[in-house]
Image (cartoon, rainbow, N blue to C red):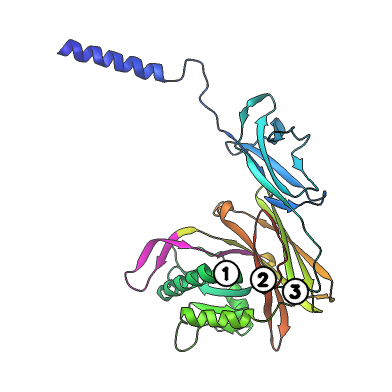
Amino acid sequence: MRPLKMLLAFFALGFAVSCGAPEGEKPMEEKLVLVPAKLTFSADGVDEVHFTVTRGGVDVTAEAQVCQTGKSCLTRPVFTTETPGDYEFYASLTNDTTVKSDPVTITAITIDEPEPDKAFRKNVTFFTFTGTWCAPCYTFKNTMKEVMEERGDEVVSVNFYMTSDAEVDLAEQNDYYDQMTGAGFDLGNIPASFVDLDTPLMDDEGQPSLEEIEATLATSAATPAPVGIRVDSEKSGPYINVEAEVFASVAGEYRIGILLVEDDIDARQMNDTTGYEEHYNHTNVLRTVAAGDVFGAPAVAIAEGEASTATHRFTVSSQMNAKNLSIVVYVLRYAADRWIIVNSVKATSTGLTDYRYVE
């Protein structure tokens, strides 16, 4: 039996050698990746989509060409059109067209001027101060997830994480707590949630039920918004460039706030029964506030039927998952003794989000 075992071992060795890469041949290299700066854009012949080509995380755009599927290649990695529709592109190396990326699709849409005779639809904004270490926050987060599942098209939710947990910290060092308390908001107990930066959801009796939150939501959403919001965002390297246009159907002084939020973060969360849940899906997590002010940029006067534009560039850090990032834009107006939110929108970080009207 011993010669047989040696013979089998010999054949096994020969098979292993034959399955390896032939001598002198390079191992398979990383695929090309085609990255459009935005996935939706205006079909106006002016709005441009810039493409970047990477390989193994390295920018090789200068060594590649971007081609429209079934048509010719672009003379430079930029595309614009006046025709709405879907457009599919791929990238290949200029000196070796057999090396290609997977295709990507971008969408050109028609962007109309604001319609002053229509009422802008209002989104209700929830700003919630929370923490991974906070057991009562677990219950409230799950309730809000139910709200988002049922009424998500009417709600913009943002979670401000308080910095206290040494092992998992979803918050950046900031003074948002001081800004809120300085404006008269009660953050003595966490969670603390405010509707449109005006109505507190929590009271001395504790957390509201799903039905109570939906009733508050319905009340806030009943009045049309005095402003509409259009957002145009695009990625450029480690940055996200945001342009927010606010159109006023009611003249007044307004402040515009812009946030970067992230969804689907897998991190621990304290619950109120068994302690820490090691893998909890955190959504609508605040990452960065433009200009560092929860109450937005300095007020600007917007006349009826006119628009004002605010811009900001966010830096995407290595701790963020770029695919899960969104932009929140909200508009505040002074009422009684404080600035309250009169409309908001959660927008894609790679494209256009247009005005919405009451149907």
Q: Earlier in the sequence, mark 2 or mark 1?
A: 1
- Type of amino acid under label 3: Val
Q: Quadrant of residue 197?
A: bottom right
- Disc 2 + disc 1, Cβ < 8 Å: no
Return the x and y of residue 54 as percentages of the image width and height.
Answer: 63, 37
- Type of amino acid under label 2: Ser
Q: Residue furthest left?
A: 1
Residue closest to the eye, 132 or 281: 281
Return the x and y of residue 261 as percentages of the image width and height.
Answer: 59, 62
> Label 2, label 1: how many angstroms apart (C-alpha)?
11 Å
Q: Which residue is mark 2?
A: 344
Q: Which residue is mark 1?
A: 158
- Residues rendered magenta in the picture: 267-289
Q: Which residue is mark 3?
A: 227
Q: In the rendered image of this protein, does residue 28 appear above or below residue 137?
A: above
Q: Circle 1: is it few (<14), some (14-19), or many (20+) Cα within 10 Å?
A: many
Quadrant occupied by the N terminus: top left
Q: In the rendered image of this protein, does residue 56 appear above or below residue 188?
A: above
Residue 49 visible in image = yes
